[in-house]
Amino acid sequence: MKLSKMSRIHFTYVIIITILFFSNIVLAQNENEKTNNTYSYELGPAPGTYELLEKDKKIIIPFEFYKNKFRFKSEIKGKTYNMMLDNGTLWDDLLFFGSPKIDSAGFNLTEETQFGMTKADLDTNVTVALKNLVFKNQKVVVSRYDKNRPNMWEGFDGQFSATFFKHFVVRINFDDLFIELIPPEKFQYSGNGQEFEMKIGPFNTRTISADITLENEKTTSIDLLIDIGGLHPVYLPLGKYENITLPSKSIEGGLGSGFFNTKGYMARIKNISFGSYNLENALTAFTPVEKETDIFGNTMIGLPLLKRFNVIFNYFENKIILEPSKFYKDSFMYNITGLRFRPDRNGNLTITKVYPNSPASKSNIMENDIITKINDVPIEDFKNGEIKSLLSMEGGIIKLDLLRDNKSLSVELKLQDIL
């Protein structure tokens, strides 16, 4: 059965919601006592154990950026896997996304469970190695592979969460692309960054307080959920706060702007500040909500904002430390082609959206056109991240070779921010 575009978006959100619910159901049953918007979740014990192979060395894990996320290598039974790190909500299990590669990993899957809308299996005693660090006695949830199910995590084999944050103070250095894991008893901060309190939120999340100013010049203080897996810099709800209104210039389209809504808008806020740190014109995903809706999933900051800092997460003291990174003063760019596209089976890019009044619309590009080349280079010859970099050079002119109804054509467009 072929799903409509809106159905596919809804399907994706349902999966995410179910994963989050499943991952935290034990916490929710035992600890979800809410009084005056205060949550009683405790950090809880760390999952499994760990061993340092070289006890006097720092625990440094290199990472790379891939499709707006950062990934790093882990090893299980001599095989290497690409992992992501997420802290939108802390769960103890390691997650692995079913695939032929994962199915051949040799997990001892003895129990059945549910992973999103699909069945999954459990291994309760897995050992995972990262450089000079070995995690032992880890519980692993493995989704069952289905070639007909959309691959939401292309390029990744699995995900870490509490395995890092409940064992260590976690330092993410975006300048030099590494994660440092520091035993809490050895952590001592001596830098020049600013320390902020992380408040406890629903589903064992953490929030940070920020001041938001929109074009109406009114400033609102909001607790924003911290999610390094978030795809947009800022997420804000429409309808919950009096001063949070949709800016006059916006683009409708959902775009992953909230877990509970398929409809949303992309726009810019005038300013977001944390202490003395001020970021201007931050891209923001706005999601319509009911006033009584909780902040979870629609009021948060994501990776594109967080990477403007080198970040230290100290869940043991509910503290976060922010130090400006080399990305601190970078502009928040948004889709300067006016196109959305997805890879097809032939290694090309199928255009799924052309925004009005954008460089693409002015070049007469249409939905369902297929991009076969950029600047005469076949799409399949680009390495990871190269296309994104090429399409992020505002003011540049690029040439696209297209297929439309099996006919070839070429267009040029000038890259220009549409927000």
Image (cartoon, grey):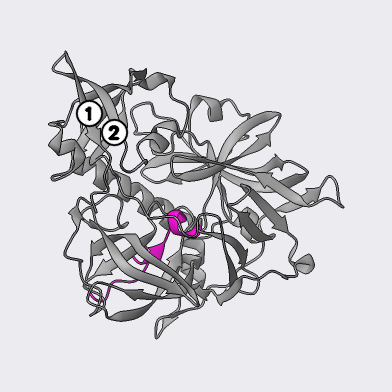
Lower position in the chain sequence, tag 1 or tag 2: 2
Is there any visible trace of residue 141 in the rendered image?
no
Q: Quick check: 55 above or below 296?
A: above
Q: How many marks?
A: 2
Across and down, in percent, residue 300 comes to 39, 65
Q: Based on the displayed image, in which of its 4 quarters is residue 114 positioned?
A: top left
Residue beneath label 1, please?
412
| C-alpha distance separating marks 1 and 2 | 7 Å
Residue 227 in view here: yes
Q: Image height check: is 345 above or below 192?
A: above
Return the x and y of residue 78 as percentages of the image width and height. 71, 29
Residue plotted at (39% across, 86% down): 36
Q: Does the magenta stretch include residue 263?
A: no
Q: In which quadrant of the rendered view does residue 210 lie?
A: bottom left
Residue 325 sits above or below residue 246 on the image = above
In the picture, residue 249 is in which quadrant?
A: bottom left
Q: Where is residue 68 in the image (x, y as percent from the top left)?
A: 44, 44
Q: What stretch is highlighted in magenta?
A: 291-306
Quadrant in which the C terminus appears: bottom left
Name the amino acid type tagged 2: Ile
Q: Residues within 10 Å of mark 1 (few under 14, many from 20)?
A: some
Residue at left offset 57%, top offset 51% = 93
Residue 217 location, x and y as percent?
A: 26, 78
Assess whether mark 2 and mark 1 are in contact (beta carbons under 8 angstroms). yes
Label 2, on which residue? 397
Element at label 1 = strand
Main secondary structure type of the part rendered in magenta: loop
